Image: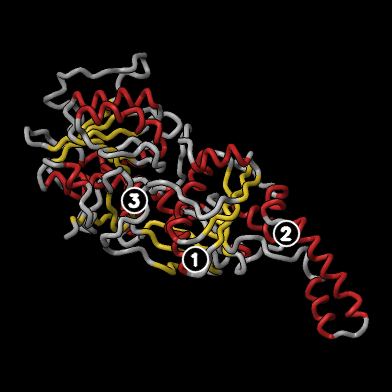
Amino acid sequence: MYDFLFWGKKQVLKKISSVFIVLGLCACASRGIRTTGGQNELYTETNEINVVRHDDFRVGVLLPLSGEFSKQGNGLKNATMMAMDDINDSGLVLQYYDTKGTPEGASIAIENALNQGAQMIIGPMLSSSVQAITPAAKSSGVPVIAFNSASEVLQDGIYTMGLLLDEQVDRVMTYSVQQGRTRFGILVPDNNTGIAVARAAVKSAAKNGAAVTTIAFYKPGTTDFTDVLKSMTNYSSRSSRLNQMKAQYKSQAAAGNAEATRMMNKLNKLDSYGDVGFDAVLIPDYGATLKSAVAMFGYYDVFSPEIKFIGTSIWENTSLNKESTMRGSWYPSLSRQNNTYFINKYTELFGERPSSLYSLGYDAVALASAISRSGTDNLDYKITNPEGYLGVNGVFRFFNNGYNQHSLDIREVRDSGTYIVDAGPRKFTTDTGLVGGDIIPSQRPAIYGKNPATAEALIFGQPLSQEVVTVY
């Protein structure tokens, strides 16, 4: 049986300030609370929710409530408070700590949370912060449910609610293979997100019996893809091939050969001719960058549906149905089984439409409540329940290595919007999906826009050293 986390429309909307009544420190506040010093940095702990009892399940919530990522951090905090309103669990206590979006802030936050008796940690948001708190959490035996979207920092006891790039890439590539696409080109930014996507793509292709034939890198944020796509699409050789074919048919057409005339009419409409080496292109970007890239493919005679464009959930941040070159494209998104309720209530309470990231905060608190109600022993065993849990984004579950699996829909871009063409699972089977492991490519891809030796070392071997941030 699943532990059902979603309670639905059973509560009257009310202001958050009237719901959470205890703002002071709890009975164990006599333990040391470390501060960062300075008039403007007096504390990292912000408040707690609910009346404290000796048998309460205490959860430390570590979020960037100030600093560069404070908007996302406070959005997640709002969602966790909304979840507390819905679940009405008197035995669950949330304690908030500001990580300030830095590893140093996260280290102080975890120290304070543990000193105040936290039995589980929700957050942090950034991979670098997760890495910073891991030693303290592991040594204390306190499980972590973070929100990071990179997999490198995950391990036993360090889980994430975040939508991992590995899972997104595998979901859309697996669906593409099922639809007959077996050779993939990858166009990625020249940063750690690009490397992470390339790694995931090569891994998924190997799992599905397909191949990544080409990987091209571009400067992050650029809208000029002229040079890299000219190389990626083998335009020079394809252009030469076109000229050879035109020369071959020209004299035959002049002599009255009807078939040669038909071929000349066809070739005169092209700038190049021949196979580009892939039948699908994965582009994990959005906005003007995504639109410019797909448009430039057309300049080099690469069009849908012959070549299928696919992406990640980041595509949800871009209006795509007005782009004729994008129609028929596929990308994964979190299932929205119960999401309308979450969006409507969040919008009414906080005056803005929530990012899909925030819904993960709601589900994390609901998960904590489900665990709390079943007893707080064997937390890791309960967290990794193979049947998973049901939240506002559909079902999800965790694995022993910290990876997760969500119910991801595949959406197709059409004239009037995006439509689900392959719904995510409503329950999980014993299949564990793509949860890490070695990369075993069926062939080494051609690499453009980056030194091939450097790129191969990063994709097939070396760990990532910088932050990977997914925009939901």
- Mark 3: few, some, or many residues within 10 Å (few <14, many ≥20)? few
Type of amino acid at the residue the image marks with label 3: Glu
Q: Compute the Cα span from label 3 to label 1.
A: 30 Å
The percent coordinates of residue 76 (x first, y second) are 34, 41
Looking at the rendered image, the quarter that the N terminus falls into is: bottom left
Locate residue 76 relative to residue 273 in the image: left or right.
Answer: left
- Residue that appears at 64% across and 53% down: 293
Type of amino acid at the residue the image marks with label 1: Glu
The residue carrying mark 3 is 348
The residue carrying mark 2 is 299
The residue carrying mark 1 is 412
The answer to whether the residues at label 1 and label 2 have Cβ atoms under 8 Å apart is no
426 to 17, vertically: above or below: below
**Earlier sequence position, callout 3 versus callout 2:** 2
| Disc 1, SS | strand
- Mark 2: few, some, or many residues within 10 Å (few <14, many ≥20)? few
- Residue that appears at 68% across and 48% down: 228
**Earlier sequence position, callout 1 versus callout 2:** 2
Type of amino acid at the residue the image marks with label 2: Tyr
